Image (tube, grey):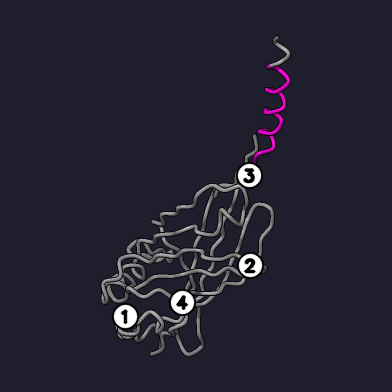
Amino acid sequence: MITKWIVPLLAAGTLLAGECTYRIADAEITWEAFKTPAKTGVQGTFGNVKLSAMPDKSEKGLIEGAKAVIDTASIDSKNRGRDAKLVKAFFQVQGVDRIEAVITRVRDGWVDLNITMNGITKEVPMKSETDEREMEAKGWIDLGDFDMLPSLASLNKACYKKHAGKTWQDVALEFKLKTIKKCR
């Protein structure tokens, strides 16, 4: 009688042992903005990013639908004075206190990212590379697409000398997602 139960339980245990789930272990979001006629880059990140992604049986399923909510006041360019100026003379000018980003599609070598800033959502295609444990994606946004040119003009005015009169409206974006796979 015991063998009637042991064989089905062992078979079920073997099937369950093969089930795997992917989760996001870590995420990093960076940006690079540009100043001066020589287009000198200024890099940074944000200290307060809330990431949400539902575990899935595939890495693609995990990544599609992953969402980040970024607190713009947590901008970090490794220069406190610059960070305060970016918050006051850029983000606060138009009341942009957060940026949202959602990965809508993963395809061969590309990721489509919907970015919402200043009440405007735009799809941003990003070139991506994926290996077994990490996805890295790079792309560009144009601040004009998000009606952020009044903020850009304000920042340019506040930093006129340091920027030699030129603050660019394109911003490079990059994100890295590290995934973990757990099987039972």
- Nearer the camera: disc 3 or disc 2: 2
First-in-chain label (4 vs 1): 4
Q: Are marks 3 and 2 in contact (CB under 8 Å)?
A: no
The amino acid on which the numbered mark 3 sits, given as a three-letter code, is Lys
Q: CA distance from mark 3 to mark 2?
A: 20 Å
In the displayed structure, 121 sits above or below 20; it is: below
Q: CA distance from mark 2 to mark 1?
A: 34 Å
- Nearer the camera: disc 3 or disc 4: 3
User: Which quarter of the rendering shows the N terminus?
Assistant: top right
User: Label 2: few (<14), some or many (≥20) within 10 Å?
Assistant: few
**Please, what is the dominant secondary structure of the magenta stretch?**
helix
Look at mark 2 in the image and give the residue it sits on: 107
Q: CA distance from mark 3 to mark 1?
A: 42 Å
User: Label 1: few (<14), some or many (≥20) within 10 Å?
Assistant: many
Q: Which mark is residue 151?
A: 1
Look at mark 3 in the image and give the residue it sits on: 181
Identify the element where label 1 is drawn.
helix
Residue 21 is situated, as x and y percent measured from the top left of the image, at: 60, 43
First-in-chain label (3 vs 1): 1
- Nearer the camera: disc 4 or disc 1: 1
Q: Which mark is residue 33?
A: 4
- Nearer the camera: disc 2 or disc 4: 2
In the displayed structure, 11 sits above or below 89; it is: above
First-in-chain label (3 vs 2): 2
Q: Are marks 2 and 4 in contact (CB under 8 Å)?
A: no
Question: Which residue occupies the foreground of this view, 43 or 19?
Answer: 19
Residue at 47 percent across and 82 percent down: it is 170
User: Which quarter of the rendering shows the C terminus?
Assistant: top right
